[in-house]
Amino acid sequence: MFKSALAVALAALAAAVQSQTYAIDPSHTAVIFEADHYATSTNRGRFAAKEGSVTIDRAGHKSSVEVIVDMASLITGVAALDRQLQGKNFFNVAEHPVGRFVASGFSFADDRVTEVSGALTLLGTTQPVTLRAMRFNCYRHPLLKREVCGGDFETTIRRSRWGITRGLDSGFQDEVRLLVQVEAIAQ
């Protein structure tokens, strides 16, 4: 009797350890974009993550993520370009101050995330997006004394799917590469 109760308790503990919730660390999480500039060079910019959470279930592979991006945090290094991209012709930050990525489709190789499929919302429009993990790791943070998981993810989107069409008729490409750097701290 004691032996079977102990086995059940250990199994429950193992299952609980397999699923962990993490809070996005805004200081280590950002979305970088790369967009064509007249087929001559590449414009790059960055958005800061405002908040979010990740739940990773290594055993059942039933994980989820929600990341909220502060669209007003956009920075390219060129103030005039920042203002233009934040305006009505592109991200319309005044009316759509946040972007959101929500996902529950995780692919794993052993206990490492290899791909995350979900939905990206920009300008009030939600479209499916799949991010490929270029790197993923979890480690025990020496200062926080907690597990931190994170990685680099990437995808290429067609901006017109979210209604961002400015410049398409004058030579700018529709494809935009997104690079997502994320770190999240176990709660």
Image (spheres, rainbow, N blue to C red):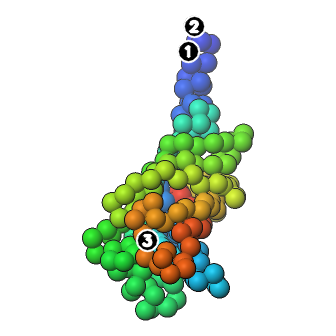
The one nearer the camera, 25 or 158, is: 158
Place of residue 76 in the rendered image (x, y in percent of width and height, measured from the top left)? 51, 84
Question: How many numbered discs, if any?
Answer: 3
Give above or below for 46 relative to 120.
below
Question: In the rendered image, is residue 140 in sight?
Answer: no
Marks 1 and 3 close (CB-CB < 8 Å): no
The residue at the point 43 percent across, 76 percent down is 166
Which residue position holds label 2? 1
Which residue position holds label 3? 165
The residue at the point 57 percent across, 67 percent down is 175
For the N terminus, the image quarter is top right
Question: In the rendered image, is residue 86 in sight?
Answer: yes
Q: Specify the amino acid type for callout 3.
A: Thr
Place of residue 86 in the rendered image (x, y in percent of width and height, measured from the top left)? 38, 79
- For label 2, the crowd category at 10 Å Cα-Cα, with few meaning under 14, some 14 to 19 and many 20 or more, is few
**In the structure shown, which secondary structural element does the residue marked by tag 3 occupy?**
loop
Marks 1 and 2 close (CB-CB < 8 Å): yes
- Numbered mark located on residue 5 in the image: 1
The disc, 1 or 3, on the residue closer to the chain's N-terminal end is 1
Give above or below for 142 relative to 138.
below
> In the rendered view, does 119 fall on the left or right side of 146?
left
Nearer the camera: disc 2 or disc 3: 3
Q: CA distance from mark 1 to mark 2?
A: 6 Å
Q: Specify the amino acid type for callout 2.
A: Met
Place of residue 159 in the rendered image (x, y in percent of width and height, measured from the top left)? 48, 66
The residue at the point 52 percent across, 63 percent down is 158
Q: CA distance from mark 2 to mark 3?
A: 68 Å
